[in-house]
Image (cartoon, helix red, strand yellow):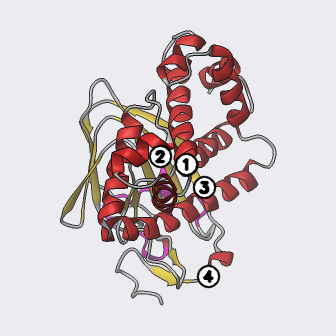
Amino acid sequence: MRQDPGYHPVRKQIPFQEWSPSIHYAQFQNIAPQVFPGRKLYDFELLYLCHGQLSVAMEHKTFYLTPGQLIVLPSGVYHRNETAALPTTKMIGIHFDFFGELNVTGEEDMVVYEGNAQEDKFAVEAVDSTCSPLTEDPVYTPSHDCIQSMEDLVREFTMRPLGYQLVCRGLMLNILAYLIRSQVTRRITDATVHGQRIKVLMREIESNPTVAWTNPVLAKRLGMSEDYTSKLFRQIAGVPPSEFLRSIRHREARKLLQETDWSIGLVGEHVGYPDIHYFSRVFTAVEGISPREYRKLSRVL
């Protein structure tokens, strides 16, 4: 299934095992409030909103993202981005194609310049027969594993150690798989009352990670048995409640270690681990390095 040239994004039905993405750009971005000029892309872009406000006007519709959401910007579709938070909006930006088909040497190979569009250069969107195109409903709430993969990809692409292209391709495939799986979760959530309640509870956990969100507490909040609460939570979130909470706390700890000069103990206490030694053990088990080493590395990057 491929659309007529000139209609974008151009889509091609091809099985997952033949996807082979290449990365053209991957960075953490801190952007002051501004309205960006409208543009089209030759490739695809993921914009993940870490902090602040982002709106994207595209195809007669404006998408308003909240922190923790991601938008997939398609190849060849006119759009305009706007950030509106002080002092800055923090995002992750990743440019890619699905088949390694673009030879990118500079911005001119990713961004279409007005009056000089090269129709044969627009990247094709891969679509497996078992799922919808990723750009069809472009706003996602990525899982924490997906966010972790995006952050790891940015670091690999920035540092470029030996074999980084292979690692970046693998991480990008992980990201695409997580987004495709989230389509199923989104359909389940939208279709059930309990799914909506779980979604609200997930947002509350994200906003208050220091609370002791035990299974009995969650079950009481939802008025269900612990077993059913845990099963439903895992179905919607993709992970058990305890793992979801741990990933929220870890993400917040990473952010605080990167962006503040707080002591390690204060960071741990702020994310729900008042014992500094326990916090260090938990953080090191997930990240592979201690909180102190992570802070040093993030400052280098």
In reply to whether residue 178 is colored magenta, the answer given is no
Earlier along the polypeptide chain: callout 4 or callout 3? 4
Q: Nearer the viewer, mark 4 or mark 1?
A: 4
Q: Nearer the viewer, mark 4 or mark 3?
A: 4
Q: Residues within 10 Å of mark 2 (few under 14, many from 20)?
A: some
Q: Residues within 10 Å of mark 4 (few under 14, many from 20)?
A: few
State which region is magenta: 102-120
Task: Mark yes or no: residue 93 visible.
Answer: yes
Q: Is residue 202 above or below residue 196?
A: above
Earlier along the polypeptide chain: callout 3 or callout 2? 3
Q: Which residue is mark 1?
A: 25
Earlier along the polypeptide chain: callout 4 or callout 2? 4
105 and 218: which is toward the camera: 218
Looking at the rendered structure, the kind of residue marked 4 is Pro
Q: Nearer the viewer, mark 4 or mark 2?
A: 4
Q: Residue furthest right?
A: 162
Residue 80 image position (x, y, % from top left): 27, 53
For marks 4 and 3, give the CA distance. 20 Å
Q: Which residue is mark 3?
A: 23
For marks 4 and 2, give the CA distance. 26 Å
For marks 3 and 2, give the CA distance. 11 Å
Q: Is residue 84 above or below residue 229?
A: above
Residue at 34 percent of width and 45 percent of height: 221
Label 3, secondary structure: give it.
strand
Q: Is residue 226 above or below residue 30?
A: below
